[in-house]
Amino acid sequence: MAFPYKPVAFLTGANGPIHALAYSASPGTYILAGSADRSIRLYNPSPSTTILPANSYITKKQQQQQQQQQQQQQSPQNSHESLPEGRLIQSYQAHSHEVLSLAVTADNARFASAGGDRTVFLWDVATAQTVRRFSHATEGHVGRVNCVAVGGGGGGGGDGDGSLVVSGGFDTTVRVWDARGGGGGGGGGAKPIQVLSDATDAISSVVVRGAEILAGSVDGRVRCYDVRVGKVTTDVVGASVTSLCLSRDGKAMLVGSLDSRVRLMDREGGSCLRAYGGSGEEAEGWRNVDFRVQSLLGGGERFVVAGDEMTAAAGAGAGGGHAAADGGRLWVWDLMTGRLAARVPVPWGPGGTERLKKVVGRDGKPKERKYVVSCLAWREGGFGDQFCAGGTSGAVTVFGPA
């Protein structure tokens, strides 16, 4: 499978940076996006089609103007601005702070969301209503919830049936919630059925596979909990862990960390099979030491893909073919060789969104915002022909085959 490097659509409507992306379960027709404006939006990335009424007509002059506009849009400098926009299907609102993580159940009927309001919600997709609210006055998260995953059903991989919801927070805990139970706790909200408190710093990412819960932490460790036997296995990475992605067979995991490295690790032996980024010519320009930037496996597990926090020195990584101010960037490595396969530019967004580049700093002076590509999602768990990327621009860019 060739890498789908071509932008095919924009998903717009958010009034702030995009913090979370998730595809619906197979075949991955829809995309969920959570943003800093406290909303979650459901999109169909296929471009919308405008159907003209039967009695519509245009003059010859209008036809010539349309042809000229199409020619301008097909020029390289406008190719990104002329991309079609996906269809906004539904908007979900319940969070009082930014939405930081999303997870979809295997039947696509529900999804979970977590955010800065210390709350996890379970949603009904069709009615756009919350089914469960996971927070408790004394036993819930006491800080923002950074990540969420769904499990249950006893499956060997992929998203579970949603009978269990697992969340990780700034309070250093992983909490497991029963999605089938109601509230309780004397009006204080639903109580977690299990609390995992081994970490010494914030939990940044969680993955659920069957009876296993994997949690990456800012303390530089990845912990795997086997809830069947009550066993925990710890892999020491060193630098703060920001991203976790399991291979389909569950034997390897991709770990992103704040030392500008992405590591492919053997889960059984704990060894590092391959490292991506870091030092060397092929890594020049990629830097991840400040922000949580997601990395994942894609292209049928042929590629490692990572976002870019755009804090590298000016001119570094010029091979990307665009300036930092023009948009963001993705880095793609070959899984087996570790060699850099591509630098993929991510456009800021459709025409009219350039105004979001301008912000006013704390000193009162205007500044230009950089496009930090912080979140990614790949259709069908990395085996589809499409993926999407989002970040500080507030627009989601969908990539597909050329």
Image (cartoon, rainbow, N blue to C red):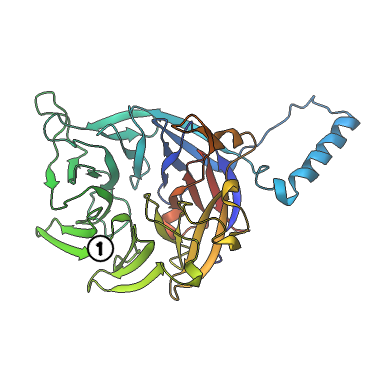
Quarter of the image where one finds residue 68: top right
Q: Which residue appears farthest toward the right when viewing the image?
A: 60
- Say whether residue 230 is left or right of residue 294: left
Question: How far across and how far down the image is residue 143, in percent?
Answer: 22, 37
Q: Nearer the viewer, residue 4 or 54?
A: 4
* Residue 288 vertical placement versus 163 (above, below): below
Q: Residue at x 80, y 24 (%)?
A: 55
Q: Residue at x 46, y 52 (%)?
A: 311
Q: Nearer the viewer, residue 46 or 5?
A: 5
Question: How far across and how far down the image is residue 11, in percent?
Answer: 54, 39
Q: Secondary structure at mark 1?
A: loop
Q: Nearer the viewer, residue 27 or 222?
A: 222
Query: Tag 1: Cα neighbours inside 10 Å, few (<14), some, or many (≥20)?
Result: some
Q: Nearer the viewer, residue 298 or 258?
A: 258
The quadrant of the image that shows the C terminus is: bottom right
Residue 4 visible in this rendered orientation of the protein? no
- Say whether residue 335 is left or right of residue 258: right
Amino acid at circle 1: Gly
Q: Which residue is mark 1?
A: 238
